[in-house]
Amino acid sequence: MRSTLLAATALAAVGSIPFAALAQDKAGPIRIGLGGEFYGAFSLASQSTGVGPDGIAGTADDAPGQNRRNNGFLRVAKIYFQGQTDLDNGLRVGVLIKLNAEDCLDQIDTAFIWFDGGYGRFEYGATSGAGDAMFIGAPDPVSHMGLNSPDLFVVNWANPAGTGNLAAVPVTKVDTSTLERLNYFTPRILGIQLGLSYAPVECVAGNTGTLPCGGTYNGMPADNLPRGYDLLQGAATWLGAIGPVKLGLYGSYMRARTGDGVVPVSGVPGTGANRQWGVGGQIAYAGFSLGGGYRRSIDDAIFFRYTPDLNASDWNLGLTYTEGNWHGGVQYAGKRTTLAGREDSFDGASVGASYLIGPGIDLFAAVQYYDWRTDSPLPATRSAATNEAWSASLGTSIDF
């Protein structure tokens, strides 16, 4: 699916359902239909290499590109189980479950039900929040390989030992995590739509996965773990037009407290109380889409999970053009992350194009440049946190 203002508009309107739910007779029971997506690419990459100042391969001061291949396949596949029913009173009720079609810690990464009527839309289950679902910002040159929460990321910001640059990957969407949530989206009135989300604990139901809540008979989850609690967020979008020019604006705020009795320790993951806010916008005219966004995170929770004093600023800008079956453009992204007087940075650019060969079937090509740097005076840190890299990718994206 192409990242344009129209795509963002549709996403906000349905509250993160990626495809139209299976229609049924009014007041009939929900019948499940199958859908999904498959996208992947073959990529070539060039990265900074070196064993670091200790002269020993395989240690924490190696460069991110050390002992990495310069080509490989990347792939993501998901199967959607989805359906809805229209009740006699006008209320629509539906369900969406996403199954990852590869081995991973979270085999089911999304599972929620929804209720939609004249009052708005409610969602309950494992899903993303309003800040992610309603996002409007910089468009991607090609699907899944942009520089804003990319689904496919070709090169490395950390070395094989897990040490790297604090800036990691740029993200201007507020709270991209999938958690056990309750979401509410208002109807759009005068171009304005509001969204609210609440997650009691930073976890997903089950005994396995990256952040398990526990099984059905485990009762209430613990309240004193090093993770986020009482995650509350709000989002708002405005959509309008001035003649043939379409406009969209986005804003979102999220906050989460730390676990009871957990003492904040600078630089220690899981002991911080995360706050995020972000803004974005997009303008579209005659096939062109220009957009950008900015996000600020206090006690950053993207890759380092609620780390006190790890503060980040992300921003990006994108311009795309669509003509017939062709779509392409350019995107820039930047990020600055600070911790204990150290500042790490990321700057990158992406150029790409895609061709729609059939309904939901894209072929794409992309070239990307990445530059991670640090102002740390320590030679070992500079070695592990510095990477100037290039990549070139050919791939396909199929919705079914």
Image (cartoon, grey):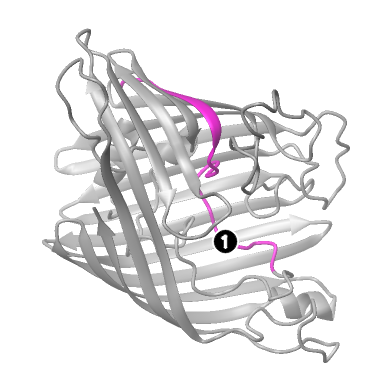
Horizontal side of residue 179 vs 355, given as left or right: right
Q: Quadrant of the N terminus?
A: bottom left
Q: Position of residue 341 (x, y in %)?
A: 82, 59
Above or below — where is 282 with respect to 190?
Answer: below
Q: Position of residue 332 (x, y in %)?
A: 45, 65
Quick one: 313 or 387, which is closer to the camera?
Answer: 387
- Which residues lie in the magenta part? 165-187
Above or below — where is 354 with respect to 200?
Answer: below
Name the dominant secondary structure of the magenta segment.
loop
- Residue that badge 1 annotates: 169
Instruction: Determine which quarter of the picture holds residue 218.
Output: top right
Q: Amino acid at mark 1?
A: Val
Instruction: Determine which quarter of the picture holds residue 143.
Output: bottom left
Q: Is residue 120 visible?
A: yes
Crowd around label 1: few <14 · some 14–19 · many ≥20 (10 Å): many
- In the current view of this chain or complex, which residue is farthest to the bottom? 55
Q: Tell me which residue sits at (88%, 30%) in the image.
A: 261
